Image: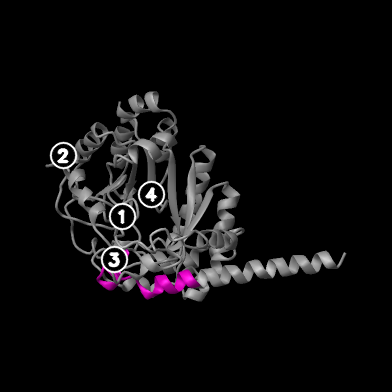
Amino acid sequence: MFAEEVGSRFGSLREIQDNTWYEKRHPYVGGIELTPYCNLRCVHCYLQDQNKKEQKLLTTEQVKVIIDKLYDAGVLFLYFTGGEIFTRSDFLEIYVYAKKKGFILELLTNGTLIDERVLEVFREFPPASISISMYGGDEVSYERVTGRKGMYDKVIRTFVLLNDSGIHFEIKYIGMKENEEDFLKVKKVAEVFGAVFSYSMELFPTLLGDSCPKNHMMELEKIVKTEMLSEGYAEEILRQASVKNSVMHKTKVPLYMCDMAVSNFLIDYQGFINPCHKSRIKKWNILSCSMQEAWDDFGSYRNEVASKYNKCVRCEYLMMCSPCVLVNKLTTGDENIPSDTVCKLTHMRVVAARRQVAQRKKAASRKWKSF
């Protein structure tokens, strides 16, 4: 519909995104959080205070109504997330409905509930991608993180099934104290299956501001040391660190310098639409309002200005760090004040990257002189 018309008039999808949708604040990337519930009990989960009591979820038909509204609004990319999406008995019905509407679909899952029945549907209606969080390199680590036995074997079996069926998937290592030695193990698994590998080692408070997930975060020195194991990481950090802070000397700087309320949004498991997945605003329910009504209201976020005491806008590493305003709010209680952890980690990364690059150059120089 909308996407096809725009594509025929304006060129490539990337050009449309950058030059048309982004500039006009067109919401083209959306997520639906189908449930806060999960079959695992991960120690770091940011939804753990949501699933401790019984929650009323969207019905199958309500989710379909939402999908129809997103279709009419011209949303092209849609992802399903949780909790664990496969804990819903109606997930495949919802998935196929969205697929037939023409959305480019991504699924976010822990991968432990994907079986042959699911694969039959995926073979006929393949997703664009499945992002699978991996919580360790063996059963011991997995149980420490998830509180469940046998999950490592289940997720490896899922990788085999997806790989044999030609379904595209990525593996994301979620690093924490419980699995801090498993980075290379998980990376190796991704290499074996030819999957895209990504990782995250920064843990954040729950959506209600409980800091308990951060108790499981690796020591900062360990995070930096682990990150430096990735080929080209040090060079990329230095490249990002060299990007000039373009707002440093401006007197009026936007508070939100991300995609907040520009292109992305999330609809939570009760139908409330939010300008991003970390912002939970119980104001607009998509079942009783129009997409445009909510989106127009979210435009006010783009007019908010950073405080004079916001040290991020004066930091030389702003473009590298890109601090999340909503994470600031959850951790310090103030959108303008970042966590000390974030600042320390940013500076430690730069120092470590400089050291590693210098050591490589020195080693290369010695090797050259030995000839």
316 is within the stretch colored magenta: no
Which residue in the protein does label 4 denote? 108
Q: Earlier in the sequence, mark 3 or mark 2?
A: 3
- Give, as a single range, the part of the protein colored magenta: 327-347
Which residue in the protein does label 3 denote? 206
Q: Earlier in the sequence, mark 4 or mark 3?
A: 4
Amino acid, disc 4: Leu
Amino acid, disc 3: Thr
Q: Earlier in the sequence, mark 1 or mark 2?
A: 1
Is the Cβ of the residue at disc 1 closer than 8 Å to that at disc 2?
Answer: no
The answer to whether one can see residue 33 in this image is no
Amino acid, disc 1: Gly
With respect to residue 172, does 126 lie above or below? above
Question: What is the spatial separation of the Cα atoms under label 4 and label 3, in whole angstroms?
Answer: 18 Å
Q: Residue furthest right?
A: 371
Residue at image coords 34%, 56%: 257
Q: Earlier in the sequence, mark 1 or mark 4?
A: 1
Amino acid, disc 2: Ser
Circle 4 residues within 10 Å: few <14, some 14–19, many ≥20:
many
Residue 25 shown left or right of residue 220 in the figure? left
Q: How is the image coloured?
A: one colour
Residue 267 shown left or right of residue 114 in the figure? left
Residue 83 circle label: 1
